[in-house]
Image (cartoon, grey):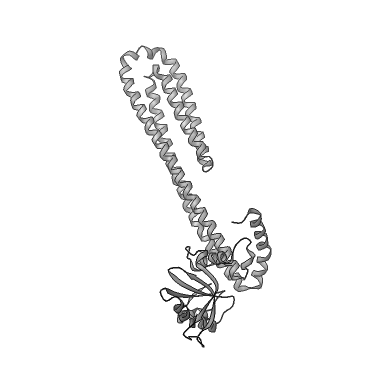
């Protein structure tokens, strides 16, 4: 990974020289346009994340509305619950502490949700204060009725306990959902970062700047380029050999025993031979295709694919690749 200062230097270099290259080389400009369009297509993942946050916010709104309805029900029941008021205050304070803990955990990711929660909690506190004043004025009258209703109050408080337990379980479930969402977001940002690194490797390869990327080997730059060109995220550095020479034992290309160099060889469950050209013609494609038997002879137990990489190929190059069973990448 690059340090922040290295990234700034690379960014400054690109911003200074890219406009000149775009004006001087039309094919290069088209290639950069194609690469940029592929990179920004990955922002659909961010749209999905925003949609999930919107759905979470709507669910929270529904839960808060349900809480408000419960508070209104409790307001009516408190008229018959004077002697147990202190116990209920303690339980409401515990509930507020749970909400505050949840707010602290959500601060870094859901600022908008936190502001809305704060407003709702302030409104709840104002309702409690108004309710407390009203209850104090009615306490003397309600005290005379407590003996006959004490049994009923016990049953109602048991129901309140059950509801608070259920509320705790919902808060724990919400916390787990938030953690899962945060992990998913981290993974998606990591994938976006990898795609950005691969795009930089691809640009470095096609303009001939393999060694300009400080701290990165040629094979690693090739791996990033191939992941972009072939849409193969499984290509790794250890699978790549650069400028590999293979011997023509059967004399397919002339005298037996002559060695031929391949720009890149990728070995895994299959073998992929690459020819990389900044400029190309039909003869180059045909000559590269003729070397297929040499690769098949060197790796008899594996499937062989031939890939021709060039900048802005014309229709004749594409047709020649199809006719010679060669994969074209640009």
Furthest residue to the bottom? 255
Q: Nearer the viewer, residue 281 or 263?
A: 263
Look at 49% across and 31% down and name the residue there.
121
Q: Which of 101 and 258 is in front in this view?
A: 258
Q: Which of 25 and 131 is in front in this view?
A: 25
User: In which quadrant of the rendered view does residue 222 lie?
Assistant: bottom right
Residue 100, image x, y percentages = 50, 33
Q: With respect to residue 131, does 288 lie above or below?
A: below
Residue 94, image x, y percentages = 45, 27
Q: Which of 60 and 291 is in front in this view?
A: 291
Residue 179, image x, y percentages = 46, 44
Look at 33% across and 25% down and name the residue there.
158
Judged left or right of residue 181, residue 155 is left
Look at 43% across and 71% down and name the residue there.
270
User: In which quadrant of the rendered view does residue 131 lie?
Assistant: top left
Residue 288, image x, y percentages = 51, 80
């Amino acid at each position: 990974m690059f340090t922040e200062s290295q990234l700034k230097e690379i960014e400054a270099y690109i911003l200074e020289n890219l406009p000149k290259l775009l004006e001087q080389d039309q094919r290069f400009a088209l290639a950069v346009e194609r690469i940029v369009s592929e990179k920004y297509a990955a922002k659909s993942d961010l749209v999905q994340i925003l949609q999930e946050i919107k759905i979470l916010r709507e669910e929270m709104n529904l839960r808060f509305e349900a809480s408000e309805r419960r508070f209104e029900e409790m307001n009516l029941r408190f008229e018959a619950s004077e002697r147990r008021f202190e116990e209920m205050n303690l339980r409401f304070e515990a509930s507020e502490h749970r909400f505050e803990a949840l707010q602290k955990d959500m601060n870094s990711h859901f600022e908008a949700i936190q502001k809305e929660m704060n407003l709702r909690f302030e409104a709840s506190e104002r309702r409690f204060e108004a309710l407390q004043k009203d209850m104090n004025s009615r306490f003397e009258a309600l005290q005379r009725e407590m003996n006959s209703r004490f049994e009923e109050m016990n049953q109602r408080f048991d129901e309140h306990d059950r509801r608070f337990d259920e509320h705790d379980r919902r808060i724990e479930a919400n916390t787990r959902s938030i953690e899962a969402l945060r992990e998913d977001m981290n993974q998606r940002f990591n994938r976006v970062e990898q795609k950005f690194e691969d795009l930089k490797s691809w640009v470095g390869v096609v303009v001939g700047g393999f060694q300009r990327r400080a701290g990165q080997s040629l094979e690693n730059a090739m791996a990033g380029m191939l992941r972009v060109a072939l849409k193969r995220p499984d290509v790794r550095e250890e699978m790549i050999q650069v400028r590999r020479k293979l011997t023509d034992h059967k004399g397919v290309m002339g005298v037996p025993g002559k060695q031929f160099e391949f720009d890149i060889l990728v070995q895994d469950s299959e073998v992929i031979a690459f020819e990389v050209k900044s400029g190309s013609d039909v003869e180059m494609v045909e000559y590269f295709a003729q070397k297929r038997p040499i690769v098949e002879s060197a790796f008899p137990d594996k499937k062989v694919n031939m890939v021709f990489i060039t900048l802005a190929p014309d229709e004749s190059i594409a047709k020649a690749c199809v006719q010679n069973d060669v994969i074209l990448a640009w």
